[in-house]
Image: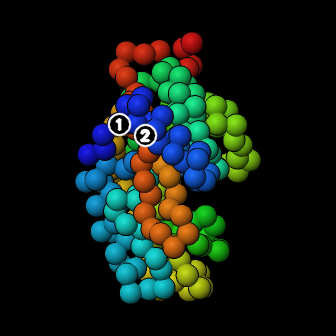
């Protein structure tokens, strides 16, 4: 279970990082351990292929792609103000497949339903973080990265199937990407979504 950082913790983390070096961070949703374990179990069908499986603890949905940041406290406050207009929502995992292009697969991922809540939340967070992404939004969680000839791997291991997992999302996380030679994502802050707040679409 992730314990949300309080104001003092966030400030200290941001100050320490600013005096040392920039952090490579991104914003997303941590997949619940039970669902992450089930998804990782499906991905293990490829464990003898030329792939790098994602650790259960690192399985997540990215909402804002990575950028370099020196002040965690400032960006955390901006994100907190943004999600203050959003309530908890349901994330539905609908399909296990190769991506991003069937003719040139590089990843094994679990696609999620593009709900209005997820789409609007992502748009608001991109604006808050000063980020942009011109690609069509295809919410997904990466389970394995293919090495070498992805088409050959996909042909030898036809893994596509429908999924029926759902997760209630009660918080948005700020993740830190591992520095060179390290592995694993670190959750720097877990910012709660609170029941009863007005959604951005109603504001």
**Residue 36 occupies which quadrant of the picture?**
bottom left
Q: Residue furthest top?
A: 203
Residue 4, disc:
1
| Helix, strand or loop at mark 1 | loop
Label 2 residue SS: strand
**Name of the residue lying farthest toward the right:** 134
Measured in 3D between alpha carbons, the distance from the residue under mark 1 to the one under mark 2, in whole angstroms, is: 6 Å
Counting from the top left corner in percent of width and height, residue 161 is at: 41, 64
The quadrant of the image that shows the C terminus is top right
The answer to whether 48 appears left or right of 146 in the picture is left
Residue 63, compared with residue 171, is above or below; it is below
In the drawing, does residue 137 fall left or right of residue 5? right
Residue 56, percent across and down?
A: 34, 62
Which residue is depicted at the point 47% across and 69% down?
182
**Can the viewer see residue 22?**
yes
| Nearer to the camera, 8 or 107 | 8
Q: Residues within 10 Å of mark 1 (few under 14, many from 20)?
A: some
Q: How is the image coloured?
A: rainbow
At a point 50% along the width and 20% down the height, the residue shown is 85
Q: Mark 2: give few (<14), some (14-19) or many (20+) Cα within 10 Å.
A: many
- The location of residue 92, given as percent across then percent down, is 40, 44
Q: Are marks 1 and 2 in contact (CB under 8 Å)?
A: yes
Is 5 drawn above or below residue 87 in the view shown? below
Q: Nearer the viewer, residue 31 or 151?
A: 31
Would residue 17 appear left or right of 144 to someone viewing this image?
right
Please give the label number shown on residue 36.
none
Tell me residue 74's x, y (percent): 57, 31
The residue shown at (59%, 85%) is: 148
Task: Specify which label sits upstream in the sequence, 1 or 2.
Answer: 1
- Residue 26 appearing in the image: no
Which residue is nearer to you in this view: 92 or 193? 193
Residue hosting label 2: 189
């Amino acid at each position: 279970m992730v314990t949300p950082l309080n104001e003092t913790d966030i400030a200290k983390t941001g100050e320490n990082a600013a005096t040392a070096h920039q952090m490579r961070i991104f914003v997303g949703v941590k997949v619940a351990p039970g669902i992450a374990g089930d998804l990782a179990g499906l991905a293990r069908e490829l464990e003898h292929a030329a792939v790098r499986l994602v650790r259960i603890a690192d399985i997540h949905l990215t909402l804002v792609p990575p950028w370099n940041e020196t002040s965690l406290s400032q960006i955390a406050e901006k994100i907190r103000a943004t999600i203050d207009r959003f309530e908890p929502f349901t994330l539905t995992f609908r399909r296990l497949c190769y991506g991003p292009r069937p003719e040139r697969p590089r990843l094994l991922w679990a696609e999620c339903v593009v709900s209005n809540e997820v789409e609007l939340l992502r748009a608001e967070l991109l604006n808050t973080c000063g980020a942009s992404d011109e690609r069509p939004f295809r919410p997904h969680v990466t389970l394995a990265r293919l090495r070498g000839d992805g088409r050959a791997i996909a042909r030898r291991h036809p893994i596509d199937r429908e999924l029926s997992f759902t997760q209630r999302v009660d918080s948005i996380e700020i993740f830190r990407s591992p520095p060179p030679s390290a592995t694993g994502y670190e959750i720097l802050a877990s910012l709660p979504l609170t029941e009863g707040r007005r959604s951005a679409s109603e504001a």
